[in-house]
Image (cartoon, rainbow, N blue to C red):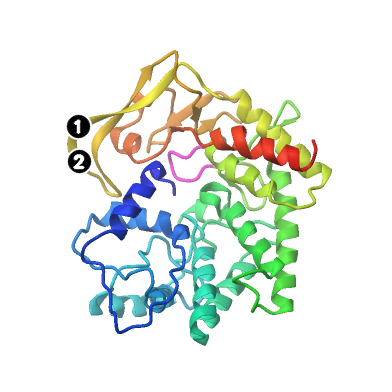
Amino acid sequence: MHGLSVFLPAALCGMLSFAGMAESHAETAYRPIPIDGFQDAIKHWNDRTGENTVQYYALHQVDKIADNLLLYQRESGGWPTNKHPLRIVSPEERAQAIKNKSLPDASFDNRNIYPQIKYLSHAYLQTGETKYRDGALKGLRYTLDRQYANGGWAHSPDRTERAYYRHITIADEVMPGVLGFLREVAAGGPPFEYIDDDLREQAARAVFKGDELLLAMQVRIDGKPAGWAGQYHEKSLKPVKGRAYELPGILAWETVPVLQYLMTIDDPSPDTVAAIQGGIAWLKSVKLNGFRVERVDTAGQRFDFHAADYDLVVVDDAQAKPIWARFYDLKTSEPFLANRNGKRVYQLSEVDIERRTGYSWYGYWPERLLQEEYPAWKQRFEL
């Protein structure tokens, strides 16, 4: 799930400028396809491996990158998370990836699956290679087939070893990301104009059900709509915990993409308008003032999922701009944090350094939404 995504662009830019990036002037130089959708995967791969000697395909090598995506696609049609799409894969890695194709480890976590479908669709339209079309359609059918009857999508639909894999998930844009993607498919615009009417109609029906569920899952406090939790039980629809330190709560970061998605609806119902306005009001009500979070240099440490040569500390600052906690209490909107032992804490200093540097507990995620996007949406609908 989320790491310190505030550092994604720099990490990505550094990767793309790597001197060992592979290029072949004898190959067709296709129009580069944006890889923004893979930023999470790239960051998590780099954090976990720390590798710095591998070569990468250039962005114009669209067929090579698309072949990488097909290599990691499972027989189910989905993809596992955090595979770097630009790496030049060794023969040994390729052989292992082929062996792994039957694994049930596909996941929508970390903004996964729908970016691969979109990239393969673009690749098909540029190259004419039907294998890319077939891979994209297989991924689309996987996405449609894995929707719960109530309209939700699980974190990892085919995995059962952890409870949260089966939960309906908002975190990491699982629900809003999938719904936004399917809304594009249903509309039939680029790069999905090749998709037939039947699949587009299926996508439209999935969006309708998903939209209704999003509104139903909005947390209410004293009868007023607030934000959204990170995960919900797939049957009871009650907020539940994800990983041990991801306790049930209203999540500011995760609420932002839900509202952004709802604001893309061209003809919002009164219920949708009320949900947006309620979510915005809640975000405004829970902003925090009087402090900022600062990085301080420390001796480098490598943890299981990331490395850090810094720590994070809270600094009192009366002039600091508003900041938001990630987690808020479901009944009181009190901000809280947690450790891997599942215990709530209320100060960043009480979080173990591994989770303090490997997770975003505070941030400015709603800032642009509140200052720019929501006012523009209100003006558009004359609200």
Question: From the viewer's perspective, is residue 229 above or below residue 371?
Answer: below
Image quadrant of residue 333? top right
Residue that label 1 marks: 298
Extent of the magenta region: 241-249
Image location (x, y in percent) of residue 330: 61, 31
Residue furthest to the top in view is 318
**For the C terminus, which image quadrant?**
top right
Residue 322 is situated, as x and y percent measured from the top left of the image, at 51, 24
Residue 367 appears in the picture as rendered: yes
- Identified by mark 1, the residue type is Thr
Q: Main secondary structure of the magenta part?
A: loop
Q: Residue at x 26, y 67 (%)?
A: 21
Relative to residue 115, is residue 30 depicted above or below?
below
Whether the magenta-drawn stretch holds residue 247 is answered as: yes
What amino acid type should be assigned to the residue bearing mark 2?
Gln
In the rendered structure, find residue 88 and report the number of the disc placed on it: none
| Identity of the residue drawn at 35% across and 79% down | 99
What is the C-alpha distance between the residues marked 1 and 2?
Answer: 9 Å
Q: From the viewer's perspective, is residue 117 above or below residue 297?
A: below
In what element is the residue under mark 2? Answer: strand
Q: Is residue 317 left or right of residue 202?
A: left
Dots 1 and 2: beta carbons under 8 Å?
A: yes
Q: Which residue is mark 2?
A: 301
Mark 2, other Cα within 10 Å: few <14 / some 14–19 / many ≥20: few
